[in-house]
């Protein structure tokens, strides 16, 4: 295993690997671990007295999360909001909206399974995913979320496959757990040192819930529904899109207090993605409001709504990453308080 | 018994013996030989396999109490702060990160599943997940040495006693005395960073605190770090209210579809 080529250069005939870091697994192919080398600083070293940084180096670590995390924000949101709609439809109209209820249950069950897979895929040690349920730690939104997703997944699967009263009960439980499932992901992001995410803590939950509602309505547009069910989905979609757009404006306002923090939402690739998300969201609202749509137009509307939600999650995610790389975002935010 | 470090940056000579001692004792892999152009700092940052990092700041600012020809060269050996309110620990969903009997913060490698939530929870950017290993790592404050009543490798190796290991209360006394002494000899810039909850309410004080002579930003330290948990309440309140919005939207959609 170790020896000369693992970056430790310890001859195992002479030294025992018992140190705290001796079991760090590192690439066997090369000499060095894959942490990136810092960029070479080309200017004459000196300090900007008024607004200093340490050679422009990031003060925070980059989030290690990959694409599957924002993708999960989307799938979890769709599952949670769909479960809630299904539960409400069954409670208020036990017989009148069977098709919608069934679809909602299958979407929530499938969404929960996909969500779990996406989360496990992101882990550094995927085989240890069950350790997520080793403790319950209320100070960690990820711990709270793991338990919520576990409970939700069981209930949603039950609602899809169990017959009669059992299925109904499971559906109601999934509906209830759908609320924290669709909203805690915003808390998960805010509960960090990343300036943009931390600063958006009061408004991001509204954006995420709005996005979850409109995305689940968009997913429902892809299937055949009765006329009444279509009307219900339309109302749900409008409510979601309005909340989503209001959430976008609120997040911009809240983060805009410190210009350096909101910069990634305004400039560069992340700013462009954020703008695209806003355009998609507004387009989705307009398409939803067109009366008497054909089945084909419904699918187009659903596709736009889906893309809007996905774009919002990825824009927030990547903008946060960029704000982590900018030491001044952290410094300005902390100096402003 | 709370143990920790007091790092007096005014006597640091930038020899990096602490970095070497840490790597050697903990048998950490090297990070490659790179040239950064950032003064003598070719280490760059703390990371999963770098638990001590000496930063170097050459700046055209004179230091009080000495003729330094209008220049001052700051050096600081950075390390995990072992916060009283530790963002990594409070964010860890598996219980892999715990507080030891020495009041230090320790990551259990056999529990960590590499979720990465500690990485974004740390307001100092200390802990990191290693790509090939998949787990999060940081300074253990030489937990293995402490259990044998030995001082941590970095403090042991420091030739100028810039890094002093000891009981927190005792260290605070020493540190305050040192600041007074420096002020008397003309180094008016000297101050303590994070020595207790009063000076840094956001973290409840650091078990590894510093004596600095310039703004924290110059050393790449956050000026007013706050553990995420302290601000999380507001996010949960919003999440609760937003969830009610979901409930209302669902009920409204069903009721609104009636003719």
Image (cartoon, rainbow, N blue to C red):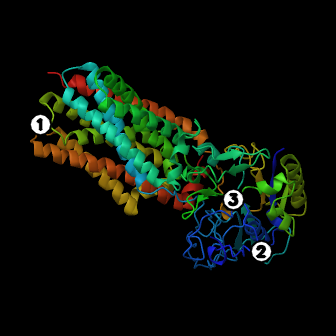
Name the chain letter of the residue that bears numbered label 2.
A
Q: Is residue A42 something that shows in the picture? A: yes
Is residue A199 visible in the rendered image? The answer is no
Q: Which mark is residue A14?
A: 2
Give residue B168's position: percent from left, percent from top. Answer: 83, 48
Q: Residue A48 in the image: state x and y as whole percent.
A: 62, 68
Instruction: Using the image, name the chain to which the residue with label 3 belongs.
Output: B
Corner quadrant of residue B189: bottom right
Identify whether B70 is placed above or below B153.
Answer: below
> Which residue is pictured at 71% across the width and 71% down the height?
B56
Q: Quadrant of residue A94?
A: top left
Which disc number belongs to residue B168?
none
* Mark 1, residue position: A291
Task: Give left or right: position of A302 versus B207.
Answer: left
Q: The residue tagged with tag 2: helix, strand or loop? A: loop
In the drawing, does residue A184 fall left or right of residue A91? right
Element at badge 3?
Answer: helix
Q: Quadrant of residue A35?
A: bottom right
Task: Mark 2 vs mark 1: tell me if same chain.
Answer: yes
Residues tagged 3 and 1 counted as in contact (Cβ below 8 A): no
Q: Is residue A212 above or below residue B154?
A: above
Cα distance between the residues tagged 3 and 1: 59 Å
Precedes in sequence: disc 2 or disc 1: 2
* Residue in the picture at 36% in, 29% down: A175
Q: Chain of mark 1?
A: A
Give me the C-alpha separation between circle 2 and circle 1: 80 Å
Left or right of B56, for residue A81? left
State the separation of the CA atoms marked 3 and 2. Answer: 43 Å
- Element under label 1? loop
Number of numbered markers:
3
Q: Nearer the viewer, residue B132 or B235?
A: B132
Q: Which mark is residue B216?
A: 3
């Amino acid at each position: 295993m170790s020896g000369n080529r693992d970056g430790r250069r310890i001859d195992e005939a002479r030294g025992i690997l018992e140190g705290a870091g001796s079991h760090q697994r590192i690439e066997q192919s090369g000499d060095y671990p894959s942490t990136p080398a810092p960029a070479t600083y080309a200017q004459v070293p000196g300090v900007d007295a008024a607004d200093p940084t340490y050679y422009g180096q990031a003060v925070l670590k980059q989030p290690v999360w990959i694409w599957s995390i924002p993708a999960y924000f989307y799938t979890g949101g769709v599952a949670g909001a769909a479960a809630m709609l299904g539960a409400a439809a069954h409670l208020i109209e036990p017989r009148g909206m069977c098709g919608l209820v069934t679809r909602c249950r299958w979407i929530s069950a499938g969404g929960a399974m996909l969500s779990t897979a996406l989360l496990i895929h992101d882990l550094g040690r995927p085989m240890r995913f069950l350790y997520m349920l080793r403790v319950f730690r209320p100070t960690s939104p990820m711990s709270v979320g793991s338990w919520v997703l576990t409970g939700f997944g069981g209930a949603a699967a039950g609602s899809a496959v169990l017959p009669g009263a059992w299925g109904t009960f499971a559906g109601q439980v999934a509906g209830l757990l759908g609320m924290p499932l669709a909203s805690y992901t915003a808390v998960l992001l805010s509960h960090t040192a990343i300036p943009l995410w931390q600063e958006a803590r009061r408004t991001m939950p509204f954006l995420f819930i709005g996005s979850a509602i409109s995305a689940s309505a968009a997913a429902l547009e892809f299937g055949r529904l009765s006329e009444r069910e279509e009307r219900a989905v339309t109302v749900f979609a409008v409510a979601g899109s309005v909340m989503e757009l209001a959430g976008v404006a609120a997040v911009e306002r809240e983060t805009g207090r410190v210009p350096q923090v909101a910069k990634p939402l305004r400039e560069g690739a992340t700013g462009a993605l954020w703008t695209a998300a806003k355009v998609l969201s507004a387009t989705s609202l307009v398409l939803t409001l067109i009366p008497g749509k054909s089945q084909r137009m419904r699918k187009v509307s659903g596709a736009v709504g889906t893309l809007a939600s996905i774009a919002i999650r990825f824009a927030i995610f990547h903008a946060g990453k960029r704000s982590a790389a900018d030491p001044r975002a952290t410094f300005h935010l902390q100096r402003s308080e | 018994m709370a143990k920790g470090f007091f790092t007096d940056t005014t006597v640091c000579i930038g020899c990096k013996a602490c970095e070497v001692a840490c790597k050697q004792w903990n048998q950490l892999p090297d990070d490659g030989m790179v040239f950064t152009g950032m003064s003598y700092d070719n280490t760059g940052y703390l990371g999963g396999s770098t638990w001590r990092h000496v930063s170097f700041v050459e700046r055209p600012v004179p230091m009080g109490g000495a003729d330094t020809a209008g220049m001052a060269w700051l050096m600081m050996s950075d390390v995990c702060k072992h916060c009283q309110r530790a963002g990594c620990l409070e964010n860890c969903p598996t219980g892999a990160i715990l507080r030891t009997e020495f009041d230090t913060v320790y990551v259990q490698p056999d529990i960590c599943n590499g979720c990465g939530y500690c990485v974004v929870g740390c307001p100092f950017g200390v802990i990191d997940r290693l790509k090939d290993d998949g787990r999060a790592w940081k300074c253990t404050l030489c937990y293995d040495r402490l259990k044998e009543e030995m001082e941590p490798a970095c403090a042991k190796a420091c030739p100028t006693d810039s890094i002093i290991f000891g009981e927190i209360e005792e260290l605070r006394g020493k540190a305050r005395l040192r600041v007074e002494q420096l002020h008397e000899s003309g180094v008016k810039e000297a101050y303590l960073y994070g020595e207790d909850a009063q000076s840094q309410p956001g973290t409840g004080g650091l078990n590894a605190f510093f004596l600095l002579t310039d703004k924290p930003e110059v050393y790449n330290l956050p000026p007013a770090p706050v553990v995420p948990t302290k601000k999380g309440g507001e996010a949960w309140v919003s999440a609760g209210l937003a969830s009610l919005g979901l409930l209302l939207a669902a009920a409204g959609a069903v009721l609104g579809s009636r003719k």
